[in-house]
Image: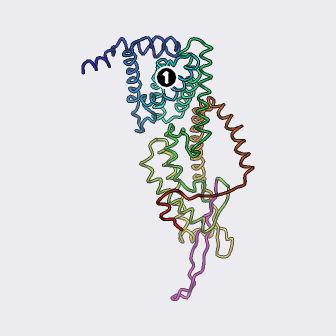
Amino acid sequence: MDKIFEKLFGDFTIQNFIKWLKELLVFYRHPYITIEHISRHSSGNIFSQFLFYLLFSNSFYFLFSRNENGFPLNFNLALDGVLSQFPLLLSFTVSSKIVTKKFNISKIIIFLLLVLFSYTPLQIIVYSNFLRFENYVFSYISSILSFILSLGIVFLWSFAIEINKMKAIKMILINLIFINSSTFFLDYVKIDPYSQPMTFIGDDPIYKDYNQIIKHIYSKEKTPIAFVYENIETNLDLIGLEKKKKLNVLIGTIDGKTNQFTTTYKSTQEYKESIAVNIENLQNLDSMIVFRRNKIILSKWYNQFNKINQIINEHSTTEYFKENVNTFEHILPNKYLQRIVYTDLIVDLVNLEDYHKNVLKNHTNCKNIVELAPYIINLPARFVDNFIVSNLKSDTLKKGPLRYNFENLDDEIYHRYNTK
């Protein structure tokens, strides 16, 4: 047991920690020299060095995983990052073998691990501050770092393991051919066309958190601006021999999206139901929303619909009608119109829309920055798909007649319950 411990942690000394951290810092300035130096060490020493880097990177995760809103850091640990390097390892190894006649696996592994372990702490610090301060400036920085890292790995890796620049350039070109070929066959020539790509939404918890609010709100663009009162006569009062009158109240709403004014019985009922559902949904969501900024927005939405509900209830009573009927427009026999502009509701709605647009804009911009690097790397594959394959597909569609045939599924249960 002592021998195993000595083999794993025997090189864990303060002097080695300082030396290894210096090599991590020097790596980006002199990548080739750093990798050559590390690769000459014994396998035990290399293992200890990168075990230290793994622990060092993950220590940042545990140091910064606590934040005021309690949201966990939404990215992989450094160990998961190691596992995600295998496709690059395969691609780089094949390219290196073709050009240099050597696999250079050890140098490629050292390069990928040095990039990963030097990048992870910085990314953790930036991303944790994004969660802590709920500020998209840190998300932009994180996205830019991801963009630089993605391009840097693909276009600079060969210079870190090969001193001959011409050979290094050839290795990059062959690697790009390999990547684009793989991308084309995996993403564009789809065996399963309904497979879904990875999305950026998982890296933007503020957007995901806010989306839980906005997708459960209905008729949010509508505000009440008028009430129509109908005094409808009903059957005779048998005691007083007088006709009773029933008061119907219709709500006139303006849709901020279409600028359309609506005042019908159906639209009134739907609007009332939407307001009631919104209030209930927002109450249920209150404990589920994580970020402070989104909690404030949820509270503002709740107050907005609560105000509207109070206005509708107040204006729908017979007492209110009797007290204010002299101020209404008499548009038809037994029909009155009250026009009211609720400026505070409109101002609040404008502010809520501004927040919505701000979150959407920042989310989209950060997403585009992150996705720009693979877009650049895979330009040849996109060109082939857009200008060659797509044209062939469209020509085939134009030539052939339209036919629809939903064949029966080869399923025992299906046939059991769907027999002629």
The residue that appears at 40% across and 32% down in the rendered structure is: 65
Q: Which stretch did the figure color magenta?
A: 227-256
Q: Is residue 136 left or right of residue 378?
A: left
Q: Residue 8 placed where, x, y %?
A: 32, 19
* Magenta part, dominant SS: strand
The residue lying furthest to the left in this view is 1
- The quarter holding residue 378 reads top right
Q: Secondary structure at mark 1?
A: helix
**Magenta segment: does it hold 238?**
yes
- The quarter holding residue 9 reads top left
Closest to the observer: 415 or 32? 415
**Residue position for label 1:** 112
Location of residue 101 with respect to 199 vertically, above or below: above
Q: Residue 248 placed where, x, y %?
A: 58, 72
Q: Residue 81 placed where, x, y %?
A: 46, 29
Closest to the observer: 250 or 25? 25
**Magenta segment: does it hold 236?**
yes
**Residue kind at label 1, given as amino acid type:** Leu
| Quadrant placement of the C terminus | bottom right
Q: Rate crowding at label 1 as few (under 14), some (14 to 19) or many (20 or more) other CA atoms within 10 Å.
A: some
The residue that appears at 46% across and 11% down in the rendered structure is: 37
